[in-house]
């Protein structure tokens, strides 16, 4: 059995979460530390199986969050445990997946791979000065995914385009770009009442006039992208909210979050929540469809004609502070 943990030694961009943020970017509050358990228990409940692979989303390292592995519980049936980053880098965000491979699992046996992590997350405070921040004039390759359509985010639908134009048309010509994005945020809060319910697309949230945190976030992102403002989804443990991207005069850019439920919070995130993924259009090698969230996944083959595919219990559990 081989365990690969190097992805968690430091951030992809080399910056620690304890580093001071650059001038003009978001500021950070006091860190919140929790222990988080992730992994999977794979059982050959329908007879022996082979070539099993489970992928599990784990907390993501990003400017406001650091992740350290504390300990591992890996049974002898497991062949290898590794990690991969889809998308990647502070600019693109992405998803970090734990990959658990099991070459062969005898009938009735269970392969277990569980990792306990220390997750340090800081709340995000608004920047001290917002007037210098601008919508980027040039959309680079790293930003292009965040102005295009994604699953559940139809940026070209006439209703989305019309509402975006209407919203920004009411903003004073002298207003800052920050104020323009804030007008979109307030429009979403006004148009869409927060109601717990099923996942909704941006268009469904607008048509229904009510949605939960995901639907509200999708609509905010769609309206931003329809106006060439980069925006993306942030998936946290039990919640989702959007981020938008602005640059200073030198072209240095940062992502700023907004709260999509509860107390109004624009350009800040007062609560430190465990961040799992950033983005809303993932291509996972083992799956054909585009995904707005790279959910846990299991593939495996029966080892005999009489056996069936394995079953899996995915583990995502807060262990406390």
Image: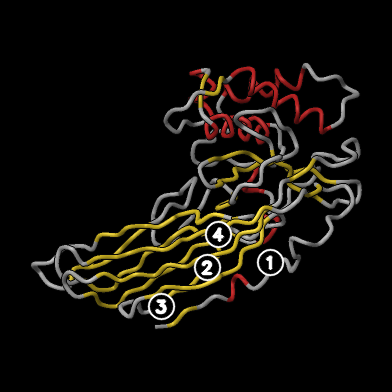
Q: Residues within 10 Å of mark 2 (few under 14, many from 20)?
A: some
Residue that badge 2 annotates: 84
Structural distance between the alpha carbons of marks 2 and 4? 21 Å
Structural distance between the alpha carbons of marks 4 and 1? 19 Å
Residue 100 falls left or right of residue 31: left
Where is residue 169, by image quadrant? top right
Label 4 or label 1, whichever lies nearer to me, is 4
Report if residue 141 is visible in the image: no
Query: Who's the residue at 51% across and 20% down the image?
Result: 210
Label 2 or label 1, whichever lies nearer to me, is 1
Residue that badge 1 annotates: 11
Q: Nearer the viewer, residue 237 or 308?
A: 237
Determine whether the residue tagged by mark 2 lies in a helix, strand or loop: strand
Residue 270 falls left or right of residue 219: right
Report if residue 158 is visible in the image: yes
Q: Is residue 93 above or below residue 137?
A: below
Determine whether label 1 and label 3 are within 8 Å by CB.
no
Label 2 or label 3, whichever lies nearer to me, is 3
- Sequence-earlier tag: 2 or 4: 4
């Amino acid at each position: 059995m081989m365990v690969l943990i190097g992805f968690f030694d430091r951030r992809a961009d080399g910056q620690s979460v304890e580093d001071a943020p650059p001038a003009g970017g978001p500021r950070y509050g006091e860190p919140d530390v929790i222990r988080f358990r992730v992994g999977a228990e794979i059982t050959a409940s329908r007879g022996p199986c082979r070539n099993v692979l489970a992928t599990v989303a784990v907390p993501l390292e990003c400017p406001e969050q650091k992740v350290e592995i504390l300990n591992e519980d890996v049974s002898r049936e497991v062949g290898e445990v590794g990690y991969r980053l889809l998308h990647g880098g502070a600019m693109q965000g992405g998803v970090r997946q734990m990959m658990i491979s099991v070459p062969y699992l005898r009938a009735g046996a269970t392969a277990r791979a569980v990792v306990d992590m220390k997750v340090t997350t800081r709340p995000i405070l608004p920047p001290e000065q917002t007037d210098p921040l601008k919508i980027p004039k040039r959309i680079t390759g790293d930003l292009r995914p965040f102005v295009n359509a994604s699953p559940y985010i139809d940026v070209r639908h006439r209703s989305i385009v019309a509402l975006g134009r209407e919203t920004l048309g009411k903003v004073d010509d002298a207003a800052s770009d920050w104020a323009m994005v804030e007008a979109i945020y307030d429009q979403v809060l006004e148009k869409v009442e927060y109601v717990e319910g099923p996942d909704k697309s941006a268009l469904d949230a607008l048509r229904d006039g009510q949605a939960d945190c995901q639907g509200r976030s999708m609509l905010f992102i769609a309206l931003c992208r329809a106006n060439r403002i980069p925006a993306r989804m942030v998936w946290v443990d039990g919640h989702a909210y959007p981020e938008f991207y602005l640059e200073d005069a030198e072209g240095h850019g940062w992502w700023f979050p907004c709260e999509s439920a509860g107390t109004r919070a624009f350009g800040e995130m007062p609560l430190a929540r465990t961040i799992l993924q950033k983005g809303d259009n993932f291509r996972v090698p083992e799956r054909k469809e585009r995904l707005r969230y790279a959910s846990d996944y299991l593939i495996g083959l029966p080892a005999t004609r009489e056996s069936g595919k394995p079953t899996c219990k995915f583990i995502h559990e807060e262990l406390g502070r």
